[in-house]
Image (tube, rainbow, N blue to C red):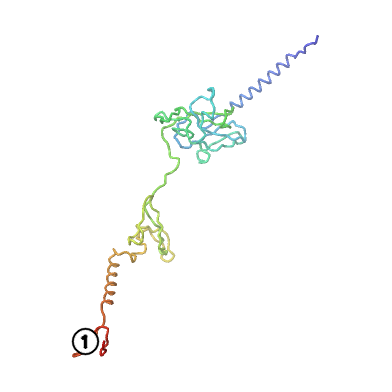
Amino acid sequence: MRATRRIPGARIAALLTLLSCCAVALSSAAAAVTIVEPRGTPTVTANAPITVVASGFAAGRPVFIEQCDGITPSTPNWSPTLNCDPGASPPPIIADAQGSATFPASNPNRAFRPFEGESPQSMFNCMSRQRRAPNNSLPSFTNCQVRVSTNNSAATADQAFFPIVLSGQSVPLSTPSSTAAPTTTVAKGAKRSSTTSTTAASGSTRKAASTGKSKPPTTRAHGRDAKTGPVSAETVTVTAGGAGVGAVSNPGVGVGYLLVAGGVLLAVGTTPFRRRRPNEPVVASGNAPGESR
């Protein structure tokens, strides 16, 4: 009969202690990731950048940030691909030597901007308590949260969350283009070209220079001329070329046409004639005097 080898109790205890230490170390590493900034539950404005700082990551790892709905991550079947929308997320930040990742609000390429309403990929709605959710058949939440992790596609042990409260206000993502009155900068003493460049408001139209109308007033710039010295701002009117030969409505051009037409009529209608002497026979047209027909 084969004898059974017994393991001393001291070895078993040592093995259990080692496994416990590994479990504690793993749980401590997972719990080490914390949100340093912002603290608590910040009230945020849609599209306005906020600074987010998280620590506890492995140095050199890329860290991602994204906005999620209000479902608790411990809920069965929770997944960042279903409950988070990275459509408005900035590029990842590389954790520094201390394991910290910072998304600064001052950096437009790395700042996190929370959204309100329908998410960029139409997955859910994040709403403030003062506004009604859009009628788009998507689930709506007033307790949305921000997730920071090293993987946007799967749940990780180093993911950390903080809730946000949307204020119901928003800022534009891009600054609208401004319109200005038509102005032209002309330095005193500089030669003007036949074409004057102006900056006009959108949708405005210009008439051709042949109509004889002058362009809008232009403004001289403050500066210094090489001959006359300093110049001040003043308003001048620049006429593009004056009236053309086809501008009949112009009084001067019309009078010129009348004078030319009168001269042509006088030149064509007036022919020289010789006064007939007394007792001189009348000569028929086409025959010279003394010539018989």
Residue drawn at the location 48% of the way across and 31% of the way down = 123
Relative height, residue 283 to residue 91 (above, below): below
Quarter of the image with the N terminus in it: top right
The image shows residue 82 at horizontal and vertical percentages of 52, 29
Residue placed furthest toward the right:
1
Residue placed furthest toward the front:
293
Relative height, residue 16 to residue 267 (above, below): above
Q: Nearer the viewer, residue 203 or 40?
A: 203
Q: Quadrant of residue 151?
A: top right
Direction from residue 286 to residue 33 in the image, left or right: right
The image shows residue 293 at horizontal and vertical percentages of 26, 86
Secondary structure at badge 1 equals: loop
Direction from residue 37 to residue 208 in the image, left or right: left
Residue drawn at the location 45% of the way across and 42% of the way down = 174
Residue drawn at the location 60% of the way across and 31% of the way down = 57
Direction from residue 26 to residue 114 in the image, left or right: left
Residue marked by disc 1: 282
Relative height, residue 273 to residue 179 (above, below): below
The image shows residue 32 at horizontal and vertical percentages of 59, 27
- Amino acid, disc 1: Val
Q: Quadrant of residue 3?
A: top right
